[in-house]
Amino acid sequence: MTNLRLEPGTAAPDFTLLNENGSAVSLADLRGTKTILYFYPAAMTPGCTTQACDFRDSIASLEGAGYRVIGVSRDEPAKLAKFRERDGLTFTLLSDPDHAVHTAYGVWGEKMNYGKVVKGVIRSTFVLDEQGVITHAQYNVKATGHVARLRKTLGLDA
């Protein structure tokens, strides 16, 4: 069960994906701002909702520290718009339906699910600096409590 793993210090793989409004967002658009890019399995599922709401609830302090938050899933833009509206999410959600960007970041592959090896999304978070270089790469994160642990890693008050 080996998947490609990106390491801190490497350039984040480039991408252009559609956001919840159907507008294209590329990695180049994010230059100049520190970015938290997190990959999650599916919008509007319990764990992913918990994680997204944790980011939502921490957004003021994350933005205050200079970070932009972006969530990426395989969901289509229309479902992402519904997720954003339903849960009052105030950050960008990106659609990667063919999981090409997931693959480039090493977050699509084999994982354990209820004791069985399955192919799917490996819940992961990347912190990028202003030049698009990965400063933190966290694979196999838990939905619950992840944002608090990430804030601690970044030196922000929990």
Image (spheres, grey):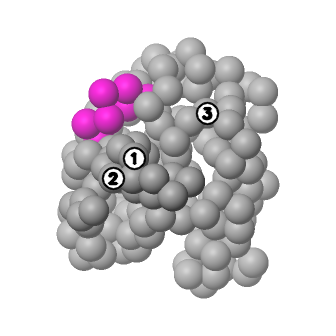
Helix or strand or loop: what does disc 2 sit on?
Answer: strand
Residue 56 location (% of width, % of height): 72, 49
Q: In which quadrant is the C terminus drawn?
A: bottom right
124 within the magenta span: no
Regarding residue 9, the answer to whether it shows in the image is yes
Magenta residue span: 95-101
State yes or no: discs 2 and 1 in contact (Cβ < 8 Å): yes
What's the distance in space between the residues labelled 1 and 3, CA to CA? 19 Å
For disc 3, the marked residue is: 43
Provide the residue designation for mark 1.
118
Q: Quadrant of the N terminus?
A: bottom left
Which is nearer the N-term, disc 2 or disc 1? 2
Mark linked to residue 110:
2
Residue visible at 68% across and 21% down?
A: 82
- Residue 97 in the magenta stretch? The answer is yes
User: The disc labelled 1 sits on which kind of residue?
Assistant: Val
Q: Is residue 1 left or right of residue 19?
A: left
